Image: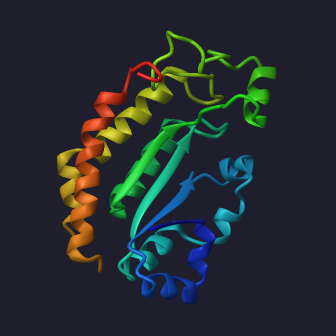
Amino acid sequence: GCQISIDVARNEKLLDQLAEAGCRFALIGFESLNPQNLKQMGKSWNNMAGDYGKVVKALHNRGINIYGTFVFGYDEDTPATIKQSLDFAMSHKLEIANFNPLTPTPGSQLYNRLLKEQRLISPTWWLDPNYRYGAPIFQPRKIEAQLLTELCFEAKKTFYSYSSITRRLVSFQKKTQWLDKGVAFLANMISHREIINKQGRSLGN
């Protein structure tokens, strides 16, 4: 397995070499389908890789499974943004995916900006004994904070529902090996359980 940036998918020769080397799983930070959000992240080059769907197909055609990550809470995000990303992950049959609310960590430029803009709901969330996993930390611009966390949680539950797992992994269109499908299935079943167990827990517990 490996972690690659999405622009790697433009290099067909490198993708062939990945497959020849035995790569079976690749983690890719899609992060957002919104160009303005990518610009704010400093990841405008994600768009340079072309259509995200072509990236997925290029990897699947080489038998490489995909762990895609998406982050929500940037200034252009709305409830529709989360649904769009979930639909993308489902329709393109990503083997594994994560849908997380943006987390401003202390010392980062993001944290300092949100603090200056007085948008932090819990300025010392990592020290707060009352903070619970999944609770809102800051107020996004175009979506209510509580709704953001709820929609991220719902996206995870939908993606890792039993019906979704079956549709995504039992596919004869992808060239992934059956052993790899088994590994992905196990990862999905663990995620199905852990999503429920983690939500609302205190940090470090």
Q: Residue at x 38, y 73 (%)?
A: 24
Q: Residue furthest front?
A: 204
Instruction: Give the quarter of the image for residue 72.
Output: top right
As displayed, is residue 160 above or below residue 94? above
As displayed, is residue 53 above or below residue 164? below
Instruction: Give the quarter of the image for residue 191.
Output: top left
Q: Residue at x 67, y 70 (%)?
A: 48
Q: Residue furthest top?
A: 130
Q: Is residue 20 left or right of residue 44?
A: left
Q: The N terminus lies in which quarter of the figure? A: bottom left
Q: Residue at x 64, y 38 (%)?
A: 74
Counting from the top left corner in percent of width and height, residue 184 is at 28, 60
Counting from the top left corner in percent of width and height, residue 57 is at 42, 76
As displayed, is residue 134 above or below residue 37? above
Between residue 183 and residue 51, name the one nearer to us.
Answer: 183
Counting from the top left corner in percent of width and height, residue 64 is at 39, 74
Q: Is residue 3 left or right of residue 99?
A: right
Counting from the top left corner in percent of width and height, residue 78 is at 55, 36
